[in-house]
Amino acid sequence: MKKYTIIPVFLLSAVLSLEAQDNGAVATGLQAADSLSAHSNDAAGGILRTSDIEEVLSSIRSRNPELEAVRQNTEAQAFQLKNENILEDPSIEYSSFYSGGVTGQSGSELVVSQGFDFPTVYAARHRKNELSRSALESGLENESRRILLDAKNLCLDIIMYRQIGDLLGMQSEIADDLLSLYEQRLESGDASSLEVNKIRMELMGLATDVAANNAALDAAYRNLASMNGGEEIIFEADEFPLTEDVSDPETAVEEYLAEDASIMAAASAAEAARKEISISKQGWIPKLEIGYRRNTAIRDAEHGFLVGCSIPLFSNHKKVAMAKAQSTSAQSTLNYTRLNAEAQVRAILNEMGQTKAAIDAYNEPLMRETLDLLRQAVEGGEISLIDYFVEASGIYSSLTACITLQNSWHKLAASLYRNRL
């Protein structure tokens, strides 16, 4: 018959204390995520109306369905880790014996038993699980920052579409005024039908651009609402937020690498893999079994304790080698993650510098002043309508390019400081 054992109180104390620490670590590790879920919008009807990007991100942090799914998955994995370091289930067996010449039951056997690992194994698993939980929490933080960065980029796109919309509105207003002016001149014979048709064609092109810009703006709002769990967000800002310039690139690189959640997750995973080697090396220690047995035979009864062990002659085969290989793999992943993150942040800084130089090449006040002068010149008959549209079109294209570059620079800055989200 298979042996089972039950562990006495004085041996259970060390293991159970580790379980209590595991429970506390799970609760502490997930406390931040639970507090974020408790956040709610103050806006009536579930609609958030704001010009502050931070308010938008705060709402999305608590409502985003993808982030909530990641939180729940992280919680499940944390409890799975805890479950790997608990005692085996106790076992109770009862057997009845019958023999010839005896009416009814001639004897019985009751066995109550509990199996458990050596206490040092539980301690080693506990330390490894703490590191694994840290890796899970860093992974959750990394996903949170990714989602919030996407949301911030949507807000920056909304600002860009608003500014481009204002520019298109100004173009349309000027074209409408010119159309009225040239229709009057056509009636008096001072303008040709070709000039009037040119203005009308310009308005047709502007109407197409306005429709495309409005469609992009609407799509950005819908995507923002989707990230907010389906609750509408009315983001009203029309100016890019104030963002600090990078005065010291190397300091920015150090900050990025020191706070990058993906590196933290990989570092914790690598340390956990090293702890797994220690656990595997203890796999040769026999599993202990302690229990209680009671035997009865007609009138007599015997009882006593069971002590046994399971010798791991085959189950621990190659486990140390496997753990070492996994540790090497985890360390390689950490090295790659760190190198990749450094390459990314340096590329961001380089692109920010190039974009900033391109923005500085534009003189927006000068371009807007030139537009006013061109309008006055065409209305005063100093230049032809064709010359006006040629010159004005180039200036409007430059203004649009300047707005787009500003959007790109702020997105790069958001990526550089994503670890602050």
Image (cartoon, rainbow, N blue to C red):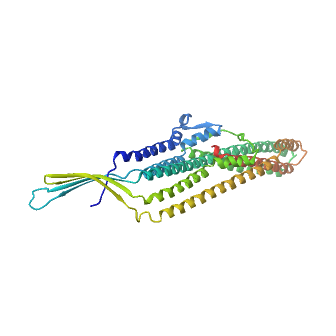
Of 399 and 270, nearer the camera is 270
| Number of dots carrying numbers | 0
- Viewer-closest of 248 and 413: 248
Residue 82 position within the rendered picture, expressed as x and y whole percent measured from the top left: 45, 49
Which residue is most to the right?
A: 382
Q: Residue at x 60, y 47 (%)?
A: 145
Locate residue 115 relative to residue 278 in the image: left or right: left
Query: Residue at 29% across / 54% down in the picture?
Result: 306
From this viewpoint, is residue 306 visible? yes
Instruction: Tell me: 414 left or right of 17.
Output: right
The location of residue 127, given as percent across then percent down, is 50, 50
> Residue 228 falls in which quadrant of the image?
top right
Q: Position of residue 64 (x, y in %)?
A: 55, 45
Q: Is residue 88 left or right of residue 194?
A: left
The reply, left or right, for residue 186 in relation to residue 328 is: right
Q: Where is residue 225 shown, x and y percent of the image?
A: 58, 44
Image quadrant occupied by the C terminus:
top right
Residue 203 seen: no
Nearest the eye: 132 or 349: 132
In the figure, 233 relative to 271: above or below?
Answer: above
* x 48%, y 52%: residue: 124
| The one of 250 and 144 positioned closer to us in this rendering | 250
Quarter of the image containing the N terminus? bottom left
